[in-house]
Amino acid sequence: MRWYIMMLGLLLVFPLTASGDYREEFEQGFLTKTWSGQQPEENFCIECHSSDKMKPEFLTLAEEWKASWHAQNGIACHDCHGGDPKDSSMSMSPHRGFVGKPSPAEVPEFCGKCHIGILKNYMESGHGKAFRSSGNGPNCVTCHGSHGIQQANIDIINEQRCTKCHSYDRARAMKQALFLTEKKIGELAADLLTLRKEGVYIEDQRKNLFSIQAEFRALFHSVDVNLVKDRTDEFSHKLAAVEKEIVSTRQELRSRRNFSAFLLLVFAGMGSALYLLTKTPKE
Ligand code: HEC
Ligand code: HEC
Ligand code: HEC
Ligand code: HEC
Ligand code: HEC
């Protein structure tokens, strides 16, 4: 009998937490986008481009792509280059939407068909204008690469990359303007991850933070230091709201834990009392 009571106690004490898998949910959200098709099981672009039929100088591209953030998010060769990954002989036919290798001038639109907000800010920026009028500005690939693209962060702004065309002063001013907001975004993302690992449902806050981040990083592409500074307060407020929710979730979690510990003590007490009660008469 006492075991039943103990078991019941344990069941009550450990709150059941069912949290959806992050990847699964992300993919569901992602697959609703217009440009995302299901990836075929057998992909001839990757197969042929990884085989020894391929020119050695092209072979590394497929390898780079496999290690990229795009590959991890289901963006394959044909999502960027078009073509048909399921039909080996027709895969690179223009009749199957193959567009081939973009010329430098085509790169912004090529990437911008998916990264729409960024394309807009970039086109209106000093960089975009210089790039279009004289080809002197950097395009997406100058800063991000093409096949081995990784998650972005402010370390992309460094002396090596940003002094090819002008002094580092401008780049440094931009990095400083981004720094505090990026730091806060990083901290909040880490807090949310910790909560998630503890089994707390934080999807709404996570999506909210993700969209604040996307908006802020699109703003970077204006390369307008004053605009970033002017809008920093607005982003601080948005991030403060996310932080407030995290703090209150933490408090709630703590009081729930304390209550659980209390229940555990009560049940343990009842358990041992019962144990003693059943024991004593026999002796
Ligand atoms: C049967 C082998 C094979 C398949 C399948 C294949 N490719 Fe290729 N691809 C090649 C070869 C070989 C070249 C190099 C052509 C050359 O420049 O000599 C090439 C070149 C390319 C280029 C560069 C073209 C240019 O304009 O310089 C791109 C981009 C490309 N492939 C993308 C794709 C995509 C996307 C797919 C799938 C939809 C695909 N390939 C499927 C063999 C293949
Ligand atoms: C995120 C978009 C993107 C994806 C995904 C992508 N490419 Fe490319 N690819 C580019 C861009 C942009 C270029 C233009 C050249 C450059 O800037 O590197 C290019 C150029 C190429 C070239 C020509 C390289 C040269 O030096 O002439 C080949 C071949 C190629 N891609 C094949 C592939 C294959 C095969 C895959 C899949 C394994 C793939 N690409 C996936 C964006 C992409
Ligand atoms: C077919 C749609 C598509 C195309 C075309 C495309 N991307 Fe992406 N890109 C995505 C998706 C989906 C992700 C993953 C979700 C995310 O991280 O935002 C991503 C992620 C990225 C990231 C990392 C974002 C982060 O979270 O830090 C960068 C940088 C990036 N892409 C740059 C480029 C560049 C540069 C090109 C052109 C060479 C390009 N993309 C072309 C769909 C695309
Ligand atoms: C391929 C050349 C090139 C590279 C690489 C480059 N820039 Fe620029 N940058 C330009 C040009 C061209 C302009 C606009 C014309 C001018 O004002 O001189 C510019 C302007 C700027 C401005 C001022 C914009 C304005 O509206 O006042 C900033 C800030 C800037 N760049 C930051 C950066 C950062 C950060 C990097 C590195 C991630 C970088 N640049 C890399 C060419 C480049
Ligand atoms: C002058 C260098 C430069 C150029 C040109 C550039 N980017 Fe970026 N990009 C960056 C930097 C730096 C960040 C990170 C900003 C931050 O962390 O606040 C970034 C961030 C991103 C992200 C991540 C956004 C997110 O939500 O996490 C994507 C996607 C992206 N860039 C795509 C592009 C595309 C597409 C183009 C061309 C239309 C482009 N970039 C042109 C430097 C550049």
Image: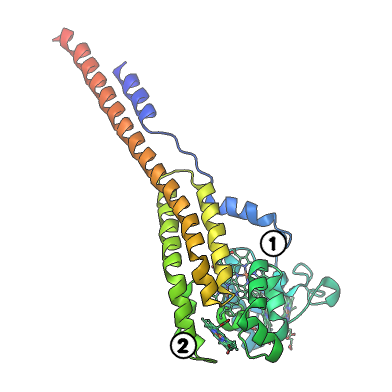
Q: What element carries label 1?
A: loop
Packing grade of label 1 (10 A; few <14, some 14-19, many >=20) is some
Furthest-right residue in this view: 95
Q: Position of residue 6 (x, y in %)?
A: 31, 23
Whether residue 15 is visible to the viewer of this picture, yes or no, is yes
Residue 168 is marked as 2
Q: Is residue 62 above or below residue 182?
A: below
Locate ligand 1 by image quadrant: bottom right
Q: Which of 124 and 69 is in front in this view?
A: 124
Q: Is mark 2 on a helix, strand or loop?
A: helix
Q: In this view, does 89 lie above or below 206?
A: below
Q: Residue sitting at 51 percent across and 52 percent down?
A: 206
Q: Nearer the viewer, residue 125 or 199?
A: 125
Give the amino acid type for the residue marked by disc 1 in the picture: Gln
Find residue 212 and report its image quarter: bottom right
Q: Where is residue 257 in the image (x, y as percent from the top left)?
A: 33, 36
Q: Residue sitting at 55 percent across and 72 percent down?
A: 227
Residue 28 is marked as none
Q: Name the residue under label 1.
A: 39
Q: How far apart are marks 2 and 1 (CA)?
A: 42 Å
Give the amino acid type for the residue marked by disc 2 in the picture: Tyr
Q: Residue sitting at 41 percent across and 43 percent down?
A: 249
Find residue 108 and report its image quarter: bottom right
Furthest-top residue in this view: 281
Q: Nearer the viewer, residue 226 or 179?
A: 226
